[in-house]
């Protein structure tokens, strides 16, 4: 504007910013901690931290930080030991149907929690597509054989050796009794750390259960994948 024919400039125009840098950093921590929540949830939690801002301001700050609402993806598994899988397959190619019918196949699998055909929404930045923080899924253990399938077990925590032993005791053994009775059983499992733990091997020995030798990183050889 002009005063007495002299040009005077204001340093900044518009309304004063209602949040501080400290407030914005607290919002970023909230989004990173709970990326699957909605803008409304972020706004509510931010307000509980004594930050006075509208929902629109909350949304705008999140976008300014580089976050965008995207569909969550499930990180794919990679298989790199083809030769060992091929060797194993050649060794087993002459096994009879009767021999395979004794095998109880098992697996833990992650299933993406979805809504309709689109999947869940997650707030993440570029290059965070496969970040564990941005993936939401449930871990399920199950077993099947030529005689049928056993009950599913939802794993709520990290699948360590102690958790796996609980699964074997309360889900695998009942499945074996139901499907095989007193018949012979060969149990299949992959090379997950919990499966090869010393305590797990001791459990199988104590229960007299034969474990099928299995090549590492070979989910494609397990027929339970088709189920």
Image (cartoon, rainbow, N blue to C red):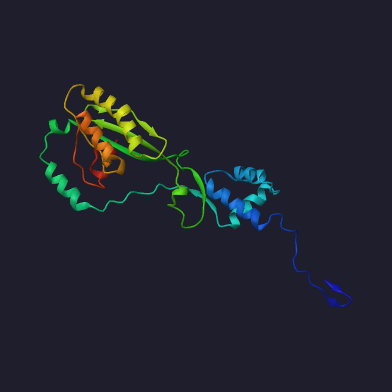
- Up-down relation of residue 130 to residue 106 (above or below): below
Compare residues 85 and 209 and report the one nearer the observer: 209
Near-viewer residue (201 or 89): 201
Image coords of residue 216 (percent x, y): 24, 47
Question: Horizontally, is 94 left or right of 42 in the view?
Answer: left
Image quarter for residue 179? top left
> Is 222 displayed left or right of 120 in the figure?
left
Q: Quadrant of residue 42?
A: top right
- Percent coordinates x, y for residue 200 in the rendering: 27, 36
Q: Give the residue drawn at x 75%, y 61%.
A: 14
Judge whether residue 63 can be spotted in this image.
Answer: yes
Residue at 65 percent of width and 58 percent of height: 21
| Above or below for 9 versus 14 | below
Quarter of the image where the C terminus is located: top left
Q: Position of residue 51 (x, y in %)?
A: 68, 48
- Of 35 and 172, nearer the camera is 172
Give the percent coordinates (x, y) of residue 134: 47, 48
Residue farthest toward the bottom in the current orientation of the protein: 5
How many numbered circles are shown? 0
Pick out the residue farthest to the left.
94
The structure residue drawn at horizontal position 25% and vertical position 46%, both measured from the top left corner, is 218
């Amino acid at each position: 504007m002009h005063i007495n024919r002299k040009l005077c400039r204001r340093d900044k125009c518009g309304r004063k910013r209602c949040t501080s840098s400290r407030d914005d950093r607290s919002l970023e921590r909230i989004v990173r901690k709970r990326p699957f929540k909605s803008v409304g949830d972020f706004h509510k939690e931010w307000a509980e931290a004594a930050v006075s801002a509208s929902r629109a301001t909350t949304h705008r700050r999140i976008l300014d930080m580089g976050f965008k609402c995207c569909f969550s993806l499930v990180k794919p598994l990679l298989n790199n030991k083809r030769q060992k899988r091929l060797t194993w397959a050649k060794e087993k190619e002459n096994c009879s149907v009767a021999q395979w019918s004794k095998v109880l196949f098992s697996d833990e699998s992650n299933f993406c929690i979805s809504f309709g055909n689109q999947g869940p929404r997650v707030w993440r930045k570029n290059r965070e597509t496969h970040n564990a923080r941005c993936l939401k899924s449930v871990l399920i253990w199950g077993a099947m054989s030529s005689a049928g399938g056993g009950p599913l077990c939802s794993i709520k925590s990290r699948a360590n050796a102690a958790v796996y032993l609980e699964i074997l005791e309360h889900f695998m053994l009942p499945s074996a009794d139901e499907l095989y009775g007193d018949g012979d059983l060969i149990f299949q499992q992959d090379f997950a750390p919990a499966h090869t733990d010393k305590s797990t091997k001791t459990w199988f020995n104590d229960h007299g259960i034969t474990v099928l030798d299995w090549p590492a990183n070979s989910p494609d050889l397990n027929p339970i994948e088709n189920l």
